Amino acid sequence: MTASIAPRPFTFSVVATAGRARAGVFTTPHGPVETPAFMPVGTLATIKALDPTEVETAGARMILANAYHLHLRPGDELIRDLGGLHRFMGWNGPIVTDSGGFQVFSLESLRTVDEDGVDFRSHIDGSKRRFTPESVMRIERNLGADVVMQFDHVVAGQSPVDVARDAAERSIRWLVRCRDAFDRLTADDPDPRQTLFPIVQGGIHAGLRQATARTIAELGGWTGYGIGGLSVGETKPDTYAMVEAVDDVLPRDRPRYLMGVGFPDDLLAGIQRGVDLFDCVAPTRMGRNGTAFTSTGRVNVRRAELRDDPRPLDAHCGCPTCTRFSRAYLRHLFAADEMLGPRLLSLHNVHFLTSLVRSARAAIVAGTPFPSPPPDSAPDGA
Amino acid sequence: MTASIAPRPFTFSVVATAGRARAGVFTTPHGPVETPAFMPVGTLATIKALDPTEVETAGARMILANAYHLHLRPGDELIRDLGGLHRFMGWNGPIVTDSGGFQVFSLESLRTVDEDGVDFRSHIDGSKRRFTPESVMRIERNLGADVVMQFDHVVAGQSPVDVARDAAERSIRWLVRCRDAFDRLTADDPDPRQTLFPIVQGGIHAGLRQATARTIAELGGWTGYGIGGLSVGETKPDTYAMVEAVDDVLPRDRPRYLMGVGFPDDLLAGIQRGVDLFDCVAPTRMGRNGTAFTSTGRVNVRRAELRDDPRPLDAHCGCPTCTRFSRAYLRHLFAADEMLGPRLLSLHNVHFLTSLVRSARAAIVAGTPFPSPPPDSAPDGA
């Protein structure tokens, strides 16, 4: 079931399946990634609060960074001149850059879309900017991530079908322009060490998703597929239904990346529907705010009840936080506004999600029952 | 030159001397510390921004925590009930707790001193509190540090001799009460794993310092001596002169701890005047603010000139910051207010000071020239 036996920079092999779920290996110029895999988010070339060595210790092999944010600060040309994103941020594993489509469309009143691209104002200083498929490819080429995502048109999760169709069709036209621009940028490079992923849009409309996926797949030659525009306000059943809708359409010998998804239940639901890659800011954002994922549900370490709790966050967790520190200590760190608190919780949360995904992979390989998602809240309400 | 050959919990051996400078080993229940040694400060049971494993990687073997702060938050009894400070904060090396004398006297308008103790208001919630030698010994016993400092009366660095004498003499009376209280608290414990250090006060008055040191030494039986009330507003020549003043008075077979001192030039000056232990918040406080010690002087990583600087902070440094990241990346982290910035600079600064002290120790042992302190500012003004 190997996708390619030729020694190419990017290959994908499915090593086992269980229903629609797949265990695979996605090989990149910066090493192999066992899939399914959860990718923590390093928006500004740092997984917030964590050191690259901790990110690796926490079990992450591939991470995401944001072209929009890095273009604005410190600048993609600066990062290129300093040797690229891997070297800049001290991460030697594979990286994917999000194109900025999601960020630009999140700006709402600050942007206007036309067929050629998007005018927007920087969220930092209000300066006027313009993204086009061509300019975004240049930015992502400068950053040098292994996987670069196409520039796409993202709409709100509950958008009606005509709005979703307009955006999905524009995203396909922009995909062709991205591919042409990417080909031009890499034409003189015998070893570009980058690949371009398309993004399937289509809102919460199954037929539109399928038509979009089919058109993109027929363009051919992609090393992987993004599924975008989900986890942006629609219901979870809608999210899952959209993943199911494209399952039979997308080629099975390429990895599928469900963008922006990463709560424990969503990861397991996605894996069971054939998804291979995920990213989400949840583990680090929640960790900074004092909330931990655990096998018995979420724990808010700021709660007064934890004041004298000698137990680890999660008795079943082998992460450097749980093996060394009590809930009482973590609560103290947050109460005293000490930086180590967000650090230790972010580390735990990333470890928790990578471990959950790894246990799902092990179940696929061994043919054993799939892990259950933890409850959304702890039984004690902590 | 071994101070004691009996297997006691606390021993101090001088292994080499160079002038007044000594290289030694201070053995504690939590392991040996090669001296001279710089101790980073973990005010609230965490070296700010750093993980205990990083503190160890940075070369620190013994750290300081603050009884005043930990009494207020999270509470010394809570820490005792959770197994003591070492276990609470995940640090298995030796710890010294400062008594709170310095903190309480820093409160100025919030405190009143009488012969029995000090009334003060918590800087957190304004609640009324009282410290006496007896209550502070109970607090430090609860915390369980290897070395507990006496409760002392600290005055401003430029205080006139009558003010300094009054405080120094009160500190001696309080020392006797601390010793008696400490003895009572540990009377039933065959292995108390703690020792009490006196603190020599006396302002910037050499005769007063000498008289105080003599009286304390004659009380006898101390495992080490604190030199306090310095680095609190007096000039550097005054600081150094006070260390010199007590050099002939304090027993040479016991470690000497110069409290609150830790800039590079002060460390080297102290070592050359016979000091064995130092602590200072400077490396972590300056690190959080974006300033790094380097072999060519201080570098402020927020400066615009560093925007595209591919060099490490310090080309001669082997710390995990300098071996992995550029000045440009560090500047980016601070510009973007990313937590990794303060982390990496704090780590570097602690590593820088422990390395400086270690190189001084090596020079003492080898009989080679003493290292020179780095300039106070970088030649390029960065």
Image (cartoon, coloured by chain):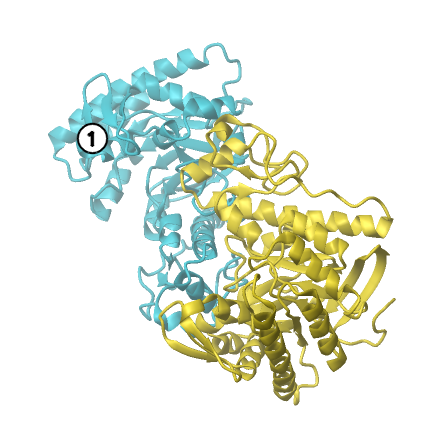
Chain colours: A yellow, B cyan
The residue lying at 32 percent from left, 29 percent from top is B100
Horizontally, residue B104 falls left or right of residue A60, namely left
Q: Position of residue B228 (x, y in %)?
A: 29, 34
Q: Is residue A278 above or below residue A58?
A: below
- Identified by mark 1, the residue type is Leu
Horizontally, residue A208 falls left or right of residue A321, namely right
Q: Position of residue A62 (x, y in %)?
A: 65, 61
Front-most of A24 and B97?
A: A24
Q: Position of residue B302 (x, y in %)?
A: 36, 64
- Residue A68 showing in the rendered view: yes
Mark 1 highlights which residue?
B110
Front-most of B314 and A155?
A: A155
Check disc 1 and report its element: helix, strand or loop. helix
The residue lying at 20 percent from left, 43 percent from top is B234
Front-most of A143 and A231?
A: A231
Query: Label 1 lies in what chain?
Result: B
The residue lying at 56 percent from left, 81 percent from top is A133
